[in-house]
Image: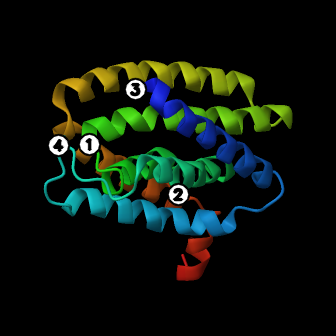
């Protein structure tokens, strides 16, 4: 990852996330809670059935400038507003539109996802809605898991990342659908 080239996109992800987090403090998230499991299942199916999904870069469909100016802040906005699956959305955008191979997309996703997490965190901390003890414990566990995952991803590449992404998207969708407060449950009569 060329950090210097990706820093403007990271800043836009952080700004988009901060705006989304500001909106999250006033808007109910029922629409997103209902749509997110469907979107996550669609992403899982895309990665599961897309042929030639490997570590080889492909032709880009969107210039890096346009990608950074449009998709990055939009996903950052979503991350601040609601959050779950934002990393998968960055990954999907890098693979489908920036033409990155899976390993390169995964690496580039991390900086943008971190930046959008920081943007939302700043806003939520300013509003006093952060549970510090739980958040710090989760942060340490996430850091340790990320270190192990990154070393495995660098050694194994798409053979590990692709099935893991599919499994995580499906597991998150099931978790969200299992929540009694999910609006989709009322729609389907569960």
Residue count near mark 3 (Cα–Cα under 10 Å), binned few <14, some 14–19, many ≥20: few
Q: Earlier in the sequence, mark 3 or mark 2?
A: 3
Select label 1 or label 4 by which is in front: 4
* Residue drawn at the location 65% of the way across and 27% of the way down: 135
Select label 3 or label 2 by which is in front: 3
The C terminus sits in image quarter: bottom right
Tell me the distance, in whole angstroms, between the alpha carbons under discs 3 and 1. 16 Å
Q: Earlier in the sequence, mark 4 or mark 2?
A: 4
Which element carries disc 3, helix, strand or loop?
Answer: loop
Select label 2 or label 1 by which is in front: 1
Tell me the distance, in whole angstroms, between the alpha carbons under discs 2 and 1. 26 Å
Q: Quadrant of residue 107?
A: top left
Residue 111 seen from this side? no
What residue sits right under mark 3 in the picture?
Answer: 2
The N terminus sits in image quarter: top left
Q: Is residue 166 above or below residue 38?
A: above
Residue count near mark 4 (Cα–Cα under 10 Å), binned few <14, some 14–19, many ≥20: few
Q: Quadrant of residue 61?
A: bottom left
Select label 3 or label 1 by which is in front: 3
Which element carries disc 4, helix, strand or loop?
Answer: loop
Tell me the distance, in whole angstroms, between the alpha carbons under discs 4 and 2. 33 Å
What residue sits right under mark 1 in the picture?
Answer: 102
Tell me the distance, in whole angstroms, between the alpha carbons under discs 1 and 4. 8 Å
Q: Position of residue 68 (x, y in %)?
A: 51, 47
Residue count near mark 2 (Cα–Cα under 10 Å), binned few <14, some 14–19, many ≥20: some
Q: Position of residue 124 (x, y in %)?
A: 77, 37
Q: Is residue 171 above or below residue 182?
A: above
Tell me the distance, in whole angstroms, between the alpha carbons under discs 3 and 2. 35 Å
What residue sits right under mark 2 in the picture?
Answer: 176
Tell me the distance, in whole angstroms, between the alpha carbons under discs 3 and 4. 18 Å
Res. 56 mark: 4
């Amino acid at each position: 990852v060329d950090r210097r080239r990706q820093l403007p996109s990271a800043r836009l992800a952080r700004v988009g996330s901060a705006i989304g987090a500001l909106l999250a403090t006033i808007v109910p998230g029922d629409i997103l809670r209902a749509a997110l499991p469907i979107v996550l299942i669609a992403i899982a199916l895309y990665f599961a059935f897309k042929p030639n999904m490997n570590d080889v870069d492909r032709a880009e469909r969107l210039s890096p400038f346009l990608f950074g100016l449009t998709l990055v802040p939009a996903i950052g906005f979503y991350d601040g507003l609601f959050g779950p699956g934002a990393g998968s959305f960055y990954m999907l955008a890098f693979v489908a539109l920036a033409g990155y191979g899976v390993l390169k997309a995964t690496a580039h996703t991390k900086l943008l996802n971190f930046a959008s997490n920081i943007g939302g965190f700043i806003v939520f901390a300013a509003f006093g809605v952060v549970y510090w003890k739980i958040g710090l414990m989760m942060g340490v566990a996430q850091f340790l898991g990320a270190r192990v995952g990154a070393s495995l991803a660098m050694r194994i590449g798409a053979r590990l990342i692709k099935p893991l992404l599919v499994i995580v998207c499906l597991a998150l969708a099931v978790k969200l659908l299992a929540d009694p407060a999910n609006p989709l449950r009322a729609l389907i009569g569960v």
